[in-house]
Image (cartoon, rainbow, N blue to C red):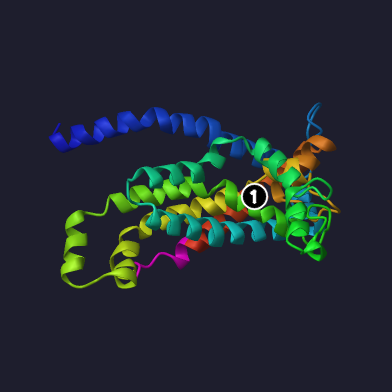
Amino acid sequence: MTSAGRARAFIAAGLLPALLLFVFFVIIPIVWSAYYGFFDWKGIGQPKFIGMDNFAEVVRDPIFWRSFKNNMLIVVASVFGQVPIALILSLLLVRNSWLHRFIRSSVFMPMVLSSVVVGIIWGYIYHPQIGILNFLLDSVGLGSWKRLWLSDPDISMYSLMVPIIWNYIGPYLIMFLAALKNIPSDMDDAALLDGAQGARKLFSLTLPMIWDTIKVAVVLCISGSLKAFDLIYVMTGGGPAHSTELLASYMYNNTFAIYRFGYGSAVSTMIILLSLLLIAGSQYLMKKEYR
């Protein structure tokens, strides 16, 4: 065996355990869930084959499409909130002084907290009687702006976007900082010699060099937003009147609240298909090299 063959064999042997775990814990459950989507099953007893009836019911259910719309709002808020904020912060905090390290740690701290804890904290912030947000509005003479932030169907979904963006900026900040630090120093020196500074350097050198990292961040944003569940479930439970219902909470309620495991499996399969379509679409739009 040649040295190249030995290297490929070594790489394959190193990747094999992770690949087996991925297949066992991810791929097989996805296929199994899709299989049960063709059955009427309560979780116990013999499943009854009903073909595409579950999927047809999903497509006809207006609550499913409302959940999908809410998820799209979360996707848009995440992609155009988390990624740009993390990118700007990474450009400002790329230096390694103690102040920059402290700010980076502060930005990353919400990610360390449990989503349930984050939901409880923001639930108190938005509380109509004892919440700090309405208290601050009163304090600065803006009492007319006070709202039932989580109980008003017209604004509850938008209120939830703030803690979602705040909670997940940290990981993308770390990703962008790592990408910025991997830009060769000689390229920075060449840019300075050419007179590229400020915005010109940003758009001509920095962003093109980390464009692949930005694409990965967008994929993670989309996939993470489509499976968002725990934070919103703690804060609103999908209410009021399904105004904050998401695809994951819709699936949970149909699966575990009314024991329609077959229907819940069909919903989870639809979520996977929609996720793949959105991720493929985002990658198609970003497939060209950054210019």
Front residue (pair 97, 107): 97
Residue 37 in the image, given as x and y percentages of width and height = 71, 42
Residue 173: in sight, yes or no? yes
Q: Which residues are magenta?
A: 283-291
Q: Quadrant of the C terminus?
A: bottom left
Quarter of the figure that contains the N terminus: top left
The picture places residue 91, in percent across and down from the top left corner, at: 38, 57
How crowded pointer 1 is (Cα within 10 Å; few <14, some 14-19, many 20+) is rated as some
Res 197 → quadrant: bottom left
Q: Along the line of sight, which residue is nearer the eye, 279 or 138? A: 138
- Is 118 on the left or on the right of 18, as rendered? right
Q: Is residue 289 magenta?
A: yes
Check disc 1 and report the residue beneath it. Answer: 163
Residue 178 lies, in percent from the top left, at 35, 47
Q: What residue is shown at x 53% (from left), y 52% (from top)?
A: 221
Q: Please name the residue shown 77% across and 54% down the image.
A: 134
Indicate left or right for 154 with 265 as reference: right
Camera-nearest residue between 12 and 101:
101
Q: Which is more toward the observer, 230 or 265? A: 230
